[in-house]
Image: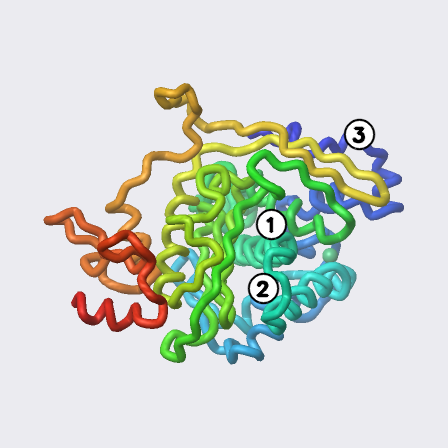
Amino acid sequence: MALTNFISFKQMQMKDNEQHGFVLELIERASSSATLTGDLCFSCGRQPTTGQGEHVIPKWLQKRFNLANERIMLINGTYLPYRSLTVPCCTDCNNGFLRNIENSIVEFVSNSAVERAAYRLKLAQWMCKILIGLLVKEKALPFDRRNPGKGSIAPPDILEDFMHAQLILQSARKETIFHALHGDFPFSLYLYKVVPDSSFGNFDLSTHLGGQSISIRIGTVGVIFVNDGGLQMEVGSMGPLGLAGKELHPIQFSEVTARVHYKASLRDATHSYVSNETPERLLVNQTAVHPYTNIRFEDGAQRIFRPWSDVDCASFIARYRNVDWGTVYDPSTELFSSTLMDRNGDLPDPRSIENQLNRRI
Ligand SMILES: [Zn+2]
C-alpha cells in the first residue's frame, strides 16, 4: 500500500501536534484499529463520551423526513433503523467541527436559493462522515481483532480509502488547500435536481462500500460522492451520460446512482499524497495516480478502471432501482432499457418518465 507518502507525519513534532491539535495527527489516531472497530471516537480516536454517540444519519434529517424507523441494510444482510445507527464519538468532535458540518448541510437543504456548487466540499465532508460511520458500524475492516477469523468483505485497500475519507472529513477542522489532479478536490461529486414525487418519498440513501461511493437524495437535491481521489471526474466530470446538474425523476436519479456505484466498483487505481500542516492551515497535495495493474491501452494510457460490462451495469441498476433485472436489460436483444435515454438519445422528461415506463411495459 502506498501509505508511506500518504501523510508526512514525521515532519512534525508530536508535542506540537498535541498543543495545536494538528489534523494529520488526529487522522492517524482516528485510523487506528481500535477506532475502526468502534471502540474510540470515530473522528479523533480519543475516548468516546458515554451515551448514544454520533448518529450516522443525523437526527435533524431523521426528524425532517420522518426517517427514525426507516432501516438500512448492512452488508451482512441485517437491517438497522436509522435511529440506532450510531458510532462512538467524543463531545469535542460532536459539538465542534461535526456540528459545523451539519449546520452547513441544514442550510444547504433548507435554502433552495443557495449556490449549490459552493457546498461541494461541505457535502463531501458530510458524506465522508456517513461513509466512515457506516464502515465503522459494519466492522467490515480487515483487522477486526476481536473476530480475526471472521474474514473480510472489504477490498484490500480499504485502510487507505478509510484514511482518505478521514482526510476529507477532517479538512473541515481548519482551512485546507487542495491540489488535486482531476479537478478542484481529490474526490468525485455530482449534484442533481430531483423533481418531487410523493410515491418515492423525500429521502433515499444508498452506498457501495467496496467502491467507496454514497448517494443521497434529500428533497429536491440528489448528491453522489465517490471517495476515489477524483478518478470518476477524470473520465467524466459531468458524471454518467453527462447529466450532472440536470433535473431528474427519483427513478432516473436511482439509475445515475447505480451507474456511479458500478463505475466505483471498477476502480483499478489509487493515489499518493503529500500533506503538510501548519497551525493555521492544511495543505493536501495529490501527487500521482497509481494503477493497481500495469495494463496500458493502445494510446499508452494506463488503465484506471476495469472494463465496463453492460450486463453487470444492468444488475446494479436493477438492484438500486429495486426492479427485476429483466426490466433493465433484455439479453436476447442485448438492449438496455434506460430511464436516462430515449430513442433519440435524449434525457426523457423527468415529469413524465413514469408514464413512459408504464407504456413500455
Ligand atoms: Zn472525538
Q: Amino acid at mark 2?
A: Val
Q: Nearer the viewer, mark 1 or mark 2?
A: 2
Q: Earlier in the sequence, mark 1 or mark 3?
A: 3
Residue 186 can be seen, yes or no: yes
Q: Dot 2, crowdedness within 10 Å: few (<14), some or many (≥20)?
A: many
232 up-or-down from 328: above or below? above
Respond yes or no on whether mark 1 lies under 8 Å from ligand 1: no
Measured in 3D between alpha carbons, the distance from the residue under mark 1 to the one under mark 3, in whole angstroms, is 25 Å
Q: Which residue is mark 1?
A: 36
Q: Residue furthest left?
A: 332
Q: Dot 3, crowdedness within 10 Å: few (<14), some or many (≥20)?
A: few
Measured in 3D between alpha carbons, the distance from the residue under mark 1 to the one under mark 2, in whole angstroms, is 14 Å
Q: Which residue is mark 3?
A: 11
| Frontmost residue, 92 versus 181 | 181
**Where does residue 238 sit, x and y in percent of width and height?**
47, 48
Q: Amino acid at mark 1?
A: Leu
Q: Dot 1, crowdedness within 10 Å: few (<14), some or many (≥20)?
A: many
| Frontmost residue, 314 versus 150 | 314
| The C terminus - image quarter | bottom left
Q: Is residue 303 left or right of residue 12?
A: left
* Numbered badge on residue 56: 2
Q: Earlier in the sequence, mark 2 or mark 3?
A: 3
| Frontmost residue, 31 versus 124 | 124
